[in-house]
Image: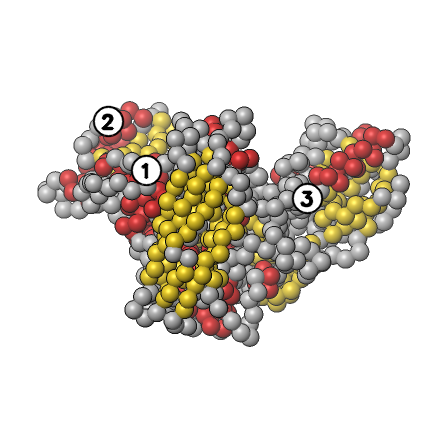
Amino acid sequence: MAALNFFIIFTSLVLPIASELLLSTYVVHVDTKTRPSHYLTQDEWYNSMVESVLENKMDSDSTSPRLFYSYDVVLQGFAARLTDQESEKLNKYPEVTRIFKDQFRIKLDTTRSPNFLGLNTGYGLWPKSNFGDDVIVGLVDTGIWPESESFKDNGIGPIPTRWKGKCVDGIAFNATRNCNRKLIGARNFVKGVENDYHHQSPRDQNGHGTHTASTAAGAEVYGANVFGFAKGKARGIASKARIAMYKACGSSSCAESDILAAIESAIKDGVDILSLSLGYDDDPFYENPVAIATFAAVKRNIFVVSSAGNLGPYPFSVHNTAPWVTTVGAGSLDRDFPIEINLSNNKTFVGSSLYPGRISGKSYPLVYIENCSRMTIDRSKVERKIVVCNTSKIEALRNGILIQKTGGVGLIQLNLATEGEGFRAMAYTLSSATLSYKEGIELLSYIKSNANPTARFVRRKGTVIGKKVRAPIVASFSSRGPNVVVPEVLKPDLIAPGLNILAAWPGDISPTRLKMDPRRVKFNINSGTSMACPHVAGVAALVRAVHPDWSPAAIKSALMTTSTAFDNAKLPIIKHEDMELATPVSIGSGHVNPESAIDPGLIYDTDTSDYINLLCSLNYTEKQMKLFTNESNPCSGFTGSPLDLNYPSLSVMFRPDSSVHFVKRTLTHVAVSKPEVYKVKIVNLNSEKVSLSIEPRKLMFNESSKKQSYMVKFESHYAFNSSRKIVEQMAFGSISWESDKHNVRSPFVVMWVQQNFNNSRLYK
């Protein structure tokens, strides 16, 4: 399929064994302070605990050991295969803090990107950072195709001496031959998910990992294209950064136990940036093993970036919402692949297609099939006709092949209402086009009102780039806020290119991923927030190269406060589903702007203690807090609020019993130019609902005064209307601190909720 999307379906890994026991995998958190002294190692203790609960003691001697991962960085504990009864028995042990049943993370979830982002080889961020050289980008994904030209090490220096990782041999993967000074790490973690032949290796059998890795840090490749489309020089955002791939996902899913093991390995190996283009549902952070693991990474100064999810355009759909993670939504590039659809009434529509074959230009009858599928597509309906379908994009490519096999000559795939006016480029196997929702309605009206409707395809130009194509526009699939776990932390944080991204592709997988498609390509075009995430990982690598002393929060702040809320036409960014103004719940702070991020002027910095305070403000119990810190009673005497987190954006929630909120923020001066004076500018798009006042209105920074704080007073003039949705009643704006050289902008959102609002998805 042309668009790679992450969706989440929670199941348990159930493994039948010879003794008829049904085993599921569990992640067990343990209080290591309680280890009895006669156990010399943690592993010895963990194995003893597992053996003590086995229903069949002979099973402890099995060739497939029950305990298969031991963790000591992302968490203290282990992963083991147990029956439900055994897990219940283990959960009663006083030394066990918490047990999670392992869950699958099911995944059905650049020649142009660097130029679009303003990166230039001759000046600015690329040469200043030496293209990210020596920064190590780790990716937890589906593996990698090492033979791709994107992973060659020409012109790259020695492997950084601090690197502790390695490449491992596997099925069809030779560590000595396949790894080099570019691809410096490749490991395999699939014990908790799929243990078949193909997953005993870091090699990518899906395409997702190869695509994301080359987007973040792929080497230069001249003449990259897919079927002649998007032709040019492909390169990752940080083209000299080193890549470490941690395969934790099979062809269709990732288990939490594998993701945890991969993140643990990445931390120990010494990655600088950790890119996670995968989604997990946002339960409270203490019930989210991946949130716990990424917290451990950030504590060790690793910048963690994750995809926002592909459940848009629905509100409250954003995932990966932990404040220590940078969460990225998806926008479009200034590049299209247009194809015309000419009707017999002289009406012309412009769609999108990656069909590489000859377009005949002949007119053919049109037929609309409401539910295109193997059951409804037959020769009597489609032979010598152009078929119009409005099924999902996942089915569109398969339908195209079925139409072709049954004698059809073309396919017009209509966008759904939620997809609106954006196009996901599709590598069709016959003359085809994807058409926007509004034009699709017009086309259906033409078909219904004409006895003999006909159409023809006309290709004027394969690829169009530049200001003729308005961009960025928020992709309709990009997940939206507000943040369902902590509404006071705005998510997503920002957006980056994620629609129709060209990047490296495995040599033995078709561009559609369909087995019935015999075509093979070196590069492929994919869409999803999974594609946006590695763009920001690459930018973060460049910033880390220029500012190696900056914390993950400092890098995040620089990326957010310098992002832009305007497109290439200097108009406010809009969204594809309705072509209306995009608010911060769609774009966060805005679209990433790499060149400005290395000199933001001011940053909102935070450290581990600030995140601990946030967790305390969520009223987590002492046992729940043990998953994040070994401190005793870390929340003792704490009286703060989630609003106290020094975050680069602001999100305020009013209940009926509150009308005023005070929010404090602290800025740190990091600009080279000193001293510097900043004045505040407020943009309030809904002043009839909420008013803002800020004190002080001027901040002065010099050598002796690098940190300054300000207070924002939000005063509500509005009452929640229970007959309307929360997102329909929100207010938006921004607070900017401006000097002669810098503009430090923070978006704000204000929402009104009913008194018993409990962050549940029931309140969408």
C-alpha distance separating marks 1 and 2: 30 Å
Specify the amino acid type for callout 2.
Lys
Which residue is found at the position 58% from the left and 50% from the top?
Answer: 331
C-alpha distance separating marks 2 and 3: 54 Å
Q: Which residue is mark 2?
A: 89
Return the mark for residue 421. Answer: 3
Label 1 vs 2, first from the N-terminus: 2
Of the residues tagged 2 and 3, which is closer to the observer? 3
Of the residues tagged 1 and 3, which is closer to the observer? 1
Q: Which residue is mark 1?
A: 618
Q: Position of residue 127 (x, y in %)?
A: 49, 73
Specify the amino acid type for callout 3.
Glu
Q: Position of residue 298 (x, y in %)?
A: 34, 53
Please tell me whether mark 3 sits on a helix, a strand or a loop: loop
Q: Is residue 188 visible?
A: no
Question: Which of the 4 quarters of the picture holds residue 98?
Answer: top left
Q: Are circles 2 and 3 on residues that touch, CB within 8 Å?
A: no
Q: Is residue 503 above or below residue 240?
A: above
Which residue is found at the position 88% from the left and 32% from the top?
Answer: 450
Of the residues tagged 1 and 2, which is closer to the observer? 1
C-alpha distance separating marks 1 and 3: 40 Å
Question: Which of the 4 quarters of the picture holds residue 583?
Answer: top right
Specify the amino acid type for callout 1.
Leu
